[in-house]
């Protein structure tokens, strides 16, 4: 542990010194601007390294808290500082590559004025560019915390499903996902979410996983608020990858893991969610029906694969439309599209839209698209649909840039 800590801090300290020595000369040496920059730069770095040291030393001693805390804000500030320095390095590296070429160019040009051609001093505009990029990243990400974190948006989607009952035309399903309640620190903000949901007068409310970051008791302060969610025909839920407490090093056969998971299942009941664990429900309304199926988390790659689609679909009547709740959208491409039984629509979450991107005026983009083909919104293939909700909450970075927290309202006909 200590060896890794020393290596980690040493590596970033070298990068820090490299970046500092490159952009500090932007300000005239000895000037007030130069002195202020030097003090602020190293003060921030010292605070960040102190936090890293503290987290490493106390990682195994930490216990999940049921109280509000600002850990996510601390991790977000660390993330902001590292990202700003990371992107600020690119112009400096480019500058050094140019300087290398200039240096070797001196040996191949036979000209008494060659030094004027191959001046190996740093290019001022690249130093300024580095400073500009770093500052822009910091300002933008801070803005994402202040203005994006709780900027909840309701999205209305109209969808036609094959053989949908005429009496159920305009059936309204409100989908919510990825609360990550361990990152919330405001009951009032969650009350806003519940009000937005209830204002829709939904026929059905579905939650598609990741109630917490890791521990069941992250959700305890919010149970009363979430239990106020209302719908005409029931509230249903499934688990996401974070609901299994797999990211803290607990073995699944350990007593503490089993206790945490058992209490997680009870939480859904306390909230009023009918938790679907690889099982189905027949939704019957005015003698018209459809199937609602829910699987445990199934994700491509290294994500846990507790979902069992065969088990969940075993009692499904294939003559009626089927809506599947499955947290990870990769499940759709890997198993759902070509499944032997009829699945008309999958509702998923998981991606958060990376909490960064563009979603305005019909333009939708995020770097997460390089990891997930279906990452936000509605997709259609082989007459089957998937809708990916970008989540209500946030993880690691306590903000949203361009991709806002989402409540989805699906009108099905």
Image: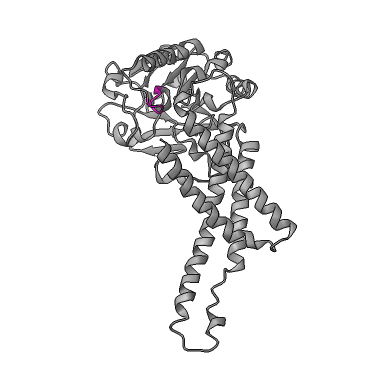
Q: Quadrant of residue 153?
A: top right
Q: Quadrant of residue 280?
A: top left
At x 47%, y 22%, the residue is 207
Coordinates of residue 383 in the picture (x, y in percent): 35, 35
Q: Nearer the viewer, residue 407 or 89?
A: 89
Say if the magenta span includes residue 121.
no
Coordinates of residue 168 in the picture (x, y in percent): 46, 20
Coordinates of residue 312 in the picture (x, y in percent): 31, 19
**In this view, 410 is above or below 282:** below
Task: Say whether residue 20 is left or right of residue 306.
Answer: right
Q: Which residues are magenta?
A: 244-249
Task: Say whether residue 30 is left or right of residue 121.
Answer: right
Q: Could you tell me which quadrant the N terminus lies in?
A: top left
Task: Say whether residue 359 is left or right of residue 1.
Answer: right
Residue 6 seen from this side: yes
Q: Nearer the viewer, residue 73 or 173?
A: 73
At x 61%, y 57%, the residue is 131
**In this view, 177 is above or below 1:** above
Coordinates of residue 72 in the picture (x, y in percent): 55, 31
Q: Nearer the viewer, residue 266 or 66?
A: 66
At x 57%, y 43%, the residue is 80
């Amino acid at each position: 542990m200590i060896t890794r800590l020393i290596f980690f801090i040493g590596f970033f300290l070298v990068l820090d010194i490299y970046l500092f020595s490159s952009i500090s000369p932007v300000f005239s040496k000895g000037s007030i601007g130069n002195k202020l920059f030097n003090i602020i730069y190293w003060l921030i770095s010292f605070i960040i390294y102190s936090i890293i040291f503290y987290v490493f030393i106390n990682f195994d001693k930490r216990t999940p808290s049921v109280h509000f805390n600002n850990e996510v804000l601390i991790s977000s500030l660390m993330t902001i500082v590292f990202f700003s320095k990371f992107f600020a390095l690119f112009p400096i590296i480019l500058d050094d590559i140019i300087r290398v070429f200039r240096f070797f160019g001196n040996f191949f040009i036979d000209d008494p004025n060659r030094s004027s051609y191959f001046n190996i001093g740093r290019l001022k505009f690249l130093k300024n560019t580095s400073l500009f990029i770093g500052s822009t990243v910091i300002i933008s990400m801070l803005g994402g915390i202040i203005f994006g974190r709780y900027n909840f948006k309701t999205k209305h989607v109209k969808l036609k499903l094959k053989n949908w009952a005429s009496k159920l035309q305009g059936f309204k399903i409100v989908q919510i996902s990825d609360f990550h309640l361990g990152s919330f620190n405001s009951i009032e903000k969650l009350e806003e979410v519940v009000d937005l949901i209830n204002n829709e007068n939904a026929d059905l409310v579905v939650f598609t996983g990741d109630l917490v970051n890791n521990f069941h008791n992250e959700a305890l302060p919010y149970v009363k608020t979430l239990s106020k969610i209302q719908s005409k025909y029931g509230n249903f839920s499934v688990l996401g990858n974070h609901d299994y407490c797999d990211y803290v090093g607990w073995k699944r056969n350990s007593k503490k893991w089993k206790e945490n998971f058992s209490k997680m299942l009870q939480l859904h009941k306390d909230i009023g969610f009918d938790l679907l664990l690889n099982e189905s429900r027949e939704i019957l309304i005015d003698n018209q029906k459809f199937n609602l199926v829910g699987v445990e988390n199934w994700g491509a790659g290294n994500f846990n694969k507790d979902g069992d689609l065969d088990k969940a679909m075993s009692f499904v009547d294939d003559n009626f439309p089927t809506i599947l709740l499955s947290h990870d959208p990769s499940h759709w491409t890997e198993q759902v599209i070509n499944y032997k039984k009829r699945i008309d629509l999958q509702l998923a979450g998981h991606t958060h839209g990376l909490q960064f991107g563009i979603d305005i005026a019909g333009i939708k983009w995020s770097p997460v698209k390089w990891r997930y083909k279906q990452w936000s919104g509605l997709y259609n293939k082989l007459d089957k649909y998937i809708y990916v909700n970008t989540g209500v909450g946030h993880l690691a970075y306590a903000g949203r840039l361009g991709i806002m927290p989402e409540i989805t309202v699906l009108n099905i006909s």
